[in-house]
Image: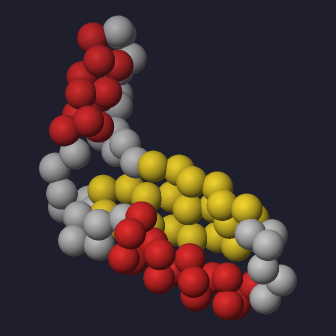
Amino acid sequence: MKARIIITPKRAVLDPQGKTVQNALEHMGYSGIQAVHVGKYLEVELAATDREAARKQLDDACHKFLSNPVIEDYKLEVE
C-alpha cells in the first residue's frame, strides 16, 4: 500500500519561498503568474493491509510531525 502526502502553506500565510520562485519566473520572462506556493511531497510505502487504520495513523503523523497545522495544510491519499 502506498500513501501520498502533499503539504502546502495555508493561503493566509506568507510564503517567502513561493514569492522568490514567482519573482525568478517573472525575471526569466514568464508572465501572468499570480502566485506560487512551495510545499512538500511525500510518498510513504506501507506494509499495512487495513486502509482505514493506515489512513488514521498517517493522518495523526501529518498533524503531529510532518506538517505544522498552524501554518500548513496537508492532503493525504492512501491507495
Say if 35 sits above or below 10 in the image. Answer: above
Please give the name of the residue rendered at 40% of the width and 48% of the height, measured from the top-left corner.
Answer: 39
Residue extending farthest to the top is 28
Percent x, y for residue 5? 56, 62
Residue extending farthest to the front is 47
Say if 55 sits above or below 8 in the image. Answer: below
Percent x, y for residue 46? 74, 69
Percent x, y for residue 24? 29, 18
Lateral position of residue 28 relative to residue 57, left or right = left
Please give the name of the residue rendered at 30% of the width and 56% of the height, measured from the top-left corner.
Answer: 9
Closer to the camera in the image, 50 or 22: 50
Say if 63 sits above or below 68 in the image. Answer: below
Closer to the camera in the image, 42 or 72: 42
The answer to whether residue 76 is seen in the rendering is: yes
Q: Considering the image in quadrants, where does the C terminus appear?
A: bottom right
Say if 51 sits above or below 35 in the image. Answer: below
